[in-house]
Amino acid sequence: MFFPEYRPRRLRRSEALRKMVRETTLLVEDLIYPLFAVSGQKVRREISSMPGIRHLSTDCLVEEAAKAQAAGIPAVLLFGVPEHKDGEGSEAWNDAGIVQQAVSAIKRELPELVVITDVCLCAYTDHGHCGVIRNGEVDNDATLKLLSAMALSHARAGADIVAPSDMMDGRVGAIRRTLDENALQNTAIMSYAIKYASAYYGPFREAAESAPRFGDRRSYQMDPANRREALREAALDVEEGADFLMVKPALAYLDVIREIRENFHLPLAAYNVSGEYSMVKASAANGWIDERRVVLENLTGIKRAGADLIISYHALDAASWLRDG
Ligand code: PBG
Ligand code: ZN
Protein backbone atom coordinates (compact mmCIF):
# COMPACT_ATOMS: atom_id res chain seq x y z
CA MET A 1 0.00 0.00 0.00
CA PHE A 2 1.39 3.36 -1.01
CA PHE A 3 0.51 7.02 -0.99
CA PRO A 4 -2.19 8.25 -1.39
CA GLU A 5 -3.99 5.16 0.03
CA TYR A 6 -1.54 4.86 2.92
CA ARG A 7 -0.87 8.08 4.76
CA PRO A 8 1.40 7.59 7.81
CA ARG A 9 0.44 11.06 9.04
CA ARG A 10 -3.12 9.81 9.85
CA LEU A 11 -1.82 8.25 13.07
CA ARG A 12 0.19 11.30 14.06
CA ARG A 13 -2.74 13.72 14.15
CA SER A 14 -3.30 13.90 17.89
CA GLU A 15 -1.44 13.05 21.06
CA ALA A 16 -4.06 10.40 21.83
CA LEU A 17 -3.40 8.67 18.51
CA ARG A 18 0.36 9.01 18.86
CA LYS A 19 0.16 7.44 22.30
CA MET A 20 -1.83 4.48 20.95
CA VAL A 21 0.81 3.61 18.39
CA ARG A 22 3.87 4.47 20.48
CA GLU A 23 6.32 1.55 20.41
CA THR A 24 8.66 2.45 23.26
CA THR A 25 7.71 3.74 26.69
CA LEU A 26 10.34 5.03 29.05
CA LEU A 27 9.42 4.20 32.65
CA VAL A 28 10.78 5.51 35.90
CA GLU A 29 11.36 1.84 36.83
CA ASP A 30 13.95 1.66 34.04
CA LEU A 31 16.24 4.17 35.70
CA ILE A 32 19.27 3.74 37.96
CA TYR A 33 20.70 6.82 39.70
CA PRO A 34 24.49 7.05 40.30
CA LEU A 35 25.75 8.67 43.52
CA PHE A 36 29.26 9.68 44.65
CA ALA A 37 30.12 8.87 48.27
CA VAL A 38 32.73 10.86 50.21
CA SER A 39 33.66 10.98 53.87
CA GLY A 40 32.61 13.68 56.33
CA GLN A 41 29.27 15.08 57.40
CA LYS A 42 26.83 17.42 55.67
CA VAL A 43 29.02 17.41 52.55
CA ARG A 44 27.12 18.30 49.35
CA ARG A 45 29.90 19.49 47.08
CA GLU A 46 28.94 20.20 43.49
CA ILE A 47 31.16 18.49 40.89
CA SER A 48 32.19 21.25 38.49
CA SER A 49 32.37 19.02 35.41
CA MET A 50 28.88 17.57 36.11
CA PRO A 51 26.45 20.38 36.98
CA GLY A 52 23.72 19.14 39.33
CA ILE A 53 25.73 16.12 40.57
CA ARG A 54 27.43 16.22 43.95
CA HIS A 55 29.92 14.53 46.22
CA LEU A 56 27.82 13.40 49.18
CA SER A 57 28.76 12.37 52.69
CA THR A 58 26.76 9.41 53.99
CA ASP A 59 24.06 11.53 55.70
CA CYS A 60 23.40 13.56 52.53
CA LEU A 61 23.73 10.51 50.31
CA VAL A 62 20.93 8.79 52.20
CA GLU A 63 18.76 11.91 51.70
CA GLU A 64 19.50 11.90 47.96
CA ALA A 65 18.74 8.17 47.78
CA ALA A 66 15.44 8.83 49.59
CA LYS A 67 14.54 11.41 46.93
CA ALA A 68 15.26 8.85 44.23
CA GLN A 69 13.11 6.27 45.94
CA ALA A 70 10.27 8.74 46.47
CA ALA A 71 10.44 9.54 42.74
CA GLY A 72 9.96 5.84 41.94
CA ILE A 73 13.55 5.08 40.92
CA PRO A 74 14.21 1.49 42.00
CA ALA A 75 18.01 1.52 42.34
CA VAL A 76 21.10 3.61 43.02
CA LEU A 77 24.67 2.92 41.89
CA LEU A 78 27.37 3.94 44.36
CA PHE A 79 30.87 5.18 43.63
CA GLY A 80 33.41 5.96 46.35
CA VAL A 81 35.84 8.86 46.28
CA PRO A 82 38.23 7.93 49.12
CA GLU A 83 40.66 10.18 50.94
CA HIS A 84 43.44 7.65 51.04
CA LYS A 85 44.91 6.17 47.86
CA ASP A 86 47.80 3.71 47.48
CA GLY A 87 49.39 1.39 44.95
CA GLU A 88 46.90 -1.44 45.46
CA GLY A 89 43.81 0.60 46.28
CA SER A 90 43.52 -1.00 49.71
CA GLU A 91 40.80 1.40 50.91
CA ALA A 92 38.51 -0.34 48.38
CA TRP A 93 38.05 -3.41 50.60
CA ASN A 94 38.07 -1.61 53.94
CA ASP A 95 34.88 -2.83 55.63
CA ALA A 96 34.56 0.63 57.20
CA GLY A 97 35.18 2.46 53.89
CA ILE A 98 32.90 5.16 52.51
CA VAL A 99 30.98 2.96 50.10
CA GLN A 100 30.54 0.26 52.74
CA GLN A 101 29.22 2.90 55.18
CA ALA A 102 26.90 4.36 52.55
CA VAL A 103 25.56 0.92 51.65
CA SER A 104 24.75 -0.01 55.23
CA ALA A 105 23.18 3.39 55.91
CA ILE A 106 20.90 3.11 52.86
CA LYS A 107 20.00 -0.47 53.71
CA ARG A 108 19.12 0.60 57.25
CA GLU A 109 17.05 3.67 56.26
CA LEU A 110 15.65 2.59 52.88
CA PRO A 111 15.61 -1.22 52.89
CA GLU A 112 13.48 -1.43 49.73
CA LEU A 113 15.87 0.57 47.56
CA VAL A 114 18.16 -1.64 45.47
CA VAL A 115 21.81 -0.80 46.09
CA ILE A 116 24.37 -1.44 43.37
CA THR A 117 28.07 -0.74 43.96
CA ASP A 118 30.72 -0.03 41.34
CA VAL A 119 33.62 -2.41 41.81
CA CYS A 120 36.86 -0.98 40.41
CA LEU A 121 40.16 0.19 41.83
CA CYS A 122 40.83 3.34 39.79
CA ALA A 123 39.40 5.77 42.37
CA TYR A 124 41.42 3.99 45.08
CA THR A 125 44.85 3.61 43.48
CA ASP A 126 47.43 6.41 43.56
CA HIS A 127 48.27 5.77 39.88
CA GLY A 128 44.60 5.86 38.82
CA HIS A 129 44.56 2.57 36.91
CA CYS A 130 41.79 0.00 37.39
CA GLY A 131 44.21 -2.70 38.55
CA VAL A 132 47.61 -3.22 40.14
CA ILE A 133 50.76 -2.33 38.22
CA ARG A 134 53.46 -5.00 37.74
CA ASN A 135 56.38 -4.28 35.42
CA GLY A 136 54.73 -1.14 34.12
CA GLU A 137 51.53 -2.93 33.12
CA VAL A 138 48.13 -3.51 34.68
CA ASP A 139 48.44 -7.10 35.92
CA ASN A 140 45.21 -8.95 35.19
CA ASP A 141 45.38 -11.96 37.50
CA ALA A 142 46.81 -10.12 40.49
CA THR A 143 43.96 -7.61 40.16
CA LEU A 144 41.27 -10.31 40.33
CA LYS A 145 42.03 -11.04 44.00
CA LEU A 146 41.67 -7.39 44.93
CA LEU A 147 38.44 -6.93 43.00
CA SER A 148 37.03 -10.04 44.68
CA ALA A 149 37.94 -8.63 48.09
CA MET A 150 36.27 -5.32 47.19
CA ALA A 151 33.10 -7.01 45.93
CA LEU A 152 32.99 -9.21 49.04
CA SER A 153 33.30 -6.21 51.31
CA HIS A 154 30.46 -4.40 49.47
CA ALA A 155 28.27 -7.51 49.60
CA ARG A 156 28.91 -7.94 53.33
CA ALA A 157 27.87 -4.32 53.84
CA GLY A 158 24.57 -5.23 52.20
CA ALA A 159 24.90 -4.40 48.50
CA ASP A 160 22.20 -6.17 46.49
CA ILE A 161 24.25 -6.06 43.30
CA VAL A 162 27.97 -5.57 42.67
CA ALA A 163 28.98 -4.06 39.35
CA PRO A 164 32.58 -4.71 38.23
CA SER A 165 33.70 -1.98 35.81
CA ASP A 166 37.42 -2.69 35.52
CA MET A 167 37.39 -4.85 32.34
CA MET A 168 39.93 -7.39 33.63
CA ASP A 169 39.56 -10.85 32.07
CA GLY A 170 37.88 -13.39 34.33
CA ARG A 171 36.66 -11.00 37.00
CA VAL A 172 33.02 -12.01 36.91
CA GLY A 173 33.95 -15.64 37.57
CA ALA A 174 36.43 -14.68 40.30
CA ILE A 175 33.89 -12.46 42.07
CA ARG A 176 31.11 -15.07 41.73
CA ARG A 177 33.32 -17.74 43.32
CA THR A 178 34.36 -15.47 46.17
CA LEU A 179 30.77 -14.45 46.94
CA ASP A 180 29.58 -18.06 46.83
CA GLU A 181 32.39 -19.27 49.11
CA ASN A 182 31.28 -16.66 51.63
CA ALA A 183 27.59 -17.58 51.63
CA LEU A 184 26.71 -14.52 49.54
CA GLN A 185 25.19 -16.55 46.72
CA ASN A 186 22.23 -14.14 46.60
CA THR A 187 24.32 -11.08 45.79
CA ALA A 188 23.90 -10.43 42.07
CA ILE A 189 26.55 -9.31 39.57
CA MET A 190 25.87 -6.60 37.02
CA SER A 191 28.81 -6.85 34.68
CA TYR A 192 30.10 -3.85 32.78
CA ALA A 193 30.61 -6.54 30.15
CA ILE A 194 31.04 -4.22 27.21
CA LYS A 195 32.90 -1.13 28.24
CA TYR A 196 34.70 0.90 25.64
CA ALA A 197 37.83 3.02 26.12
CA SER A 198 35.83 6.21 25.75
CA ALA A 199 36.56 9.93 25.90
CA TYR A 200 33.02 10.29 27.27
CA TYR A 201 34.25 9.36 30.76
CA GLY A 202 36.12 12.68 31.05
CA PRO A 203 33.80 14.46 33.50
CA PHE A 204 33.47 11.33 35.69
CA ARG A 205 37.22 11.10 36.12
CA GLU A 206 37.17 14.56 37.64
CA ALA A 207 34.21 13.54 39.83
CA ALA A 208 35.88 10.31 40.99
CA GLU A 209 39.42 11.70 40.94
CA SER A 210 40.27 8.57 38.98
CA ALA A 211 42.15 9.72 35.87
CA PRO A 212 45.21 7.52 35.20
CA ARG A 213 48.48 9.27 36.11
CA PHE A 214 50.26 7.67 33.15
CA GLY A 215 49.09 6.06 29.92
CA ASP A 216 45.41 5.31 29.33
CA ARG A 217 42.93 2.44 29.69
CA ARG A 218 43.18 1.06 26.16
CA SER A 219 44.97 -2.12 27.25
CA TYR A 220 41.88 -3.23 29.20
CA GLN A 221 38.82 -1.31 27.92
CA MET A 222 37.47 -2.07 24.45
CA ASP A 223 38.33 -0.41 21.16
CA PRO A 224 35.35 1.79 20.14
CA ALA A 225 35.60 0.40 16.61
CA ASN A 226 34.64 -3.17 17.62
CA ARG A 227 31.20 -4.78 17.56
CA ARG A 228 31.91 -8.51 17.17
CA GLU A 229 34.22 -8.31 20.17
CA ALA A 230 31.24 -7.09 22.21
CA LEU A 231 29.51 -10.41 21.55
CA ARG A 232 32.58 -12.33 22.75
CA GLU A 233 32.82 -10.21 25.91
CA ALA A 234 29.13 -10.75 26.67
CA ALA A 235 29.40 -14.50 26.10
CA LEU A 236 32.31 -14.77 28.54
CA ASP A 237 30.46 -12.93 31.28
CA VAL A 238 27.31 -15.00 30.82
CA GLU A 239 29.48 -18.11 31.13
CA GLU A 240 31.17 -16.74 34.27
CA GLY A 241 27.84 -16.14 36.00
CA ALA A 242 26.80 -12.53 35.37
CA ASP A 243 23.17 -11.72 36.24
CA PHE A 244 22.99 -8.53 34.15
CA LEU A 245 25.00 -7.30 31.19
CA MET A 246 25.87 -3.68 30.55
CA VAL A 247 26.95 -1.65 27.54
CA LYS A 248 28.84 1.56 28.24
CA PRO A 249 28.75 4.33 27.00
CA ALA A 250 25.24 4.33 25.53
CA LEU A 251 24.64 6.95 22.87
CA ALA A 252 27.58 6.30 20.54
CA TYR A 253 26.96 2.53 20.96
CA LEU A 254 23.24 2.05 20.28
CA ASP A 255 24.03 -0.58 17.63
CA VAL A 256 25.95 -2.56 20.24
CA ILE A 257 23.01 -2.37 22.66
CA ARG A 258 20.75 -3.73 19.92
CA GLU A 259 23.23 -6.50 19.09
CA ILE A 260 23.47 -7.66 22.71
CA ARG A 261 19.69 -7.47 23.17
CA GLU A 262 19.20 -9.76 20.18
CA ASN A 263 21.86 -12.28 21.10
CA PHE A 264 21.57 -12.64 24.89
CA HIS A 265 18.72 -13.17 27.30
CA LEU A 266 20.02 -11.54 30.46
CA PRO A 267 18.62 -8.19 31.59
CA LEU A 268 20.58 -5.48 29.80
CA ALA A 269 21.66 -2.14 31.26
CA ALA A 270 23.13 0.78 29.35
CA TYR A 271 25.21 3.53 30.96
CA ASN A 272 24.36 7.06 29.84
CA VAL A 273 27.80 8.27 30.95
CA SER A 274 29.15 11.52 32.35
CA GLY A 275 30.26 13.03 29.02
CA GLU A 276 26.83 12.39 27.54
CA TYR A 277 25.30 14.09 30.57
CA SER A 278 27.62 17.07 30.70
CA MET A 279 27.29 17.83 26.97
CA VAL A 280 23.52 18.09 27.41
CA LYS A 281 23.86 20.21 30.56
CA ALA A 282 26.35 22.58 28.90
CA SER A 283 24.18 23.04 25.80
CA ALA A 284 21.09 23.57 27.89
CA ALA A 285 22.87 26.12 30.08
CA ASN A 286 23.66 28.05 26.91
CA GLY A 287 20.05 27.90 25.80
CA TRP A 288 20.97 25.90 22.70
CA ILE A 289 18.72 22.91 23.38
CA ASP A 290 15.57 22.13 25.35
CA GLU A 291 17.05 20.06 28.21
CA ARG A 292 13.90 18.17 29.10
CA ARG A 293 13.11 17.14 25.53
CA VAL A 294 16.70 16.18 24.70
CA VAL A 295 17.09 14.10 27.87
CA LEU A 296 13.83 12.21 27.31
CA GLU A 297 14.74 11.69 23.65
CA ASN A 298 18.18 10.31 24.57
CA LEU A 299 16.78 7.98 27.23
CA THR A 300 13.98 6.79 24.97
CA GLY A 301 16.52 6.15 22.21
CA ILE A 302 18.61 4.02 24.57
CA LYS A 303 15.53 2.04 25.56
CA ARG A 304 14.41 1.67 21.93
CA ALA A 305 17.87 0.31 21.09
CA GLY A 306 17.16 -2.52 23.54
CA ALA A 307 18.24 -1.55 27.05
CA ASP A 308 16.01 -2.71 29.91
CA LEU A 309 17.72 -0.45 32.42
CA ILE A 310 19.41 2.92 32.01
CA ILE A 311 22.01 4.27 34.42
CA SER A 312 21.81 8.04 34.15
CA TYR A 313 22.76 11.19 36.06
CA HIS A 314 19.52 12.63 34.62
CA ALA A 315 17.49 9.99 36.51
CA LEU A 316 16.03 12.28 39.16
CA ASP A 317 15.05 14.98 36.63
CA ALA A 318 13.74 12.40 34.18
CA ALA A 319 11.62 10.81 36.91
CA SER A 320 9.92 14.12 37.67
CA TRP A 321 9.37 14.88 33.97
CA LEU A 322 7.88 11.44 33.43
CA ARG A 323 5.56 11.94 36.39
CA ASP A 324 4.41 15.33 35.10
CA GLY A 325 3.75 13.70 31.72
C1 PBG B 1 35.52 3.10 36.84
C2 PBG B 1 34.37 3.70 36.14
C3 PBG B 1 34.36 4.71 35.17
C4 PBG B 1 33.02 4.96 34.89
C5 PBG B 1 32.26 4.08 35.66
N1 PBG B 1 33.11 3.30 36.41
C6 PBG B 1 35.45 5.50 34.57
C7 PBG B 1 36.52 4.89 33.77
O1 PBG B 1 36.49 3.72 33.40
O2 PBG B 1 37.46 5.64 33.52
C8 PBG B 1 32.51 6.01 33.94
C9 PBG B 1 31.21 6.61 34.30
C10 PBG B 1 30.89 7.87 33.60
O3 PBG B 1 31.65 8.42 32.79
O4 PBG B 1 29.79 8.36 33.88
N2 PBG B 1 36.26 2.20 36.10
ZN1 ZN C 1 38.28 1.79 36.95
Image (cartoon, rainbow, N blue to C red):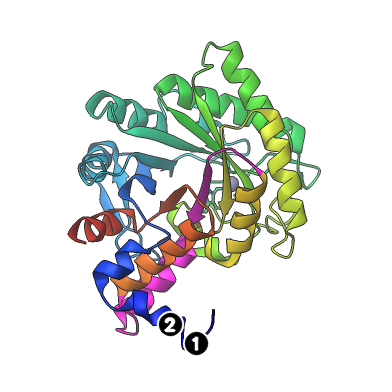
- Residue 274 among those drawn in magenta: yes
- Residue 159 among those drawn in magenta: no
Residue at screen point 59% across, 55% down: 257
Residue wearing tag 2: 7
Residue wearing tag 1: 3
Callouts 2 and 1 close, C-beta under 8 Å: yes
Q: Is residue 97 above or below residue 222?
A: above
Mark 2 belongs to which amino acid? Arg
Give the alpha-carbon distance from disc 2 to disc 1, as whole Å.
6 Å
Rendering coords of residue 283 (x, y %): 37, 79
What's drawn in magenta, residue-wise?
A: 264-290
Residue at screen point 26% across, 23% down: 108
Rendering coords of residue 8 (x, y %): 43, 79
Q: Residue furthest bottom?
A: 4
Residue at screen point 25% across, 40% down: 69
In the rendered image, the quadrant that contains the N terminus is bottom right
Q: Secondary structure at mark 1?
A: loop
Q: Secondary structure at mark 2?
A: loop
Left or right of residue 24, residue 138 in this image: right
Mark 1 belongs to which amino acid? Phe
Give the quarter of the image for residue 70: top left
Q: Say whether residue 32 is visible.
A: no
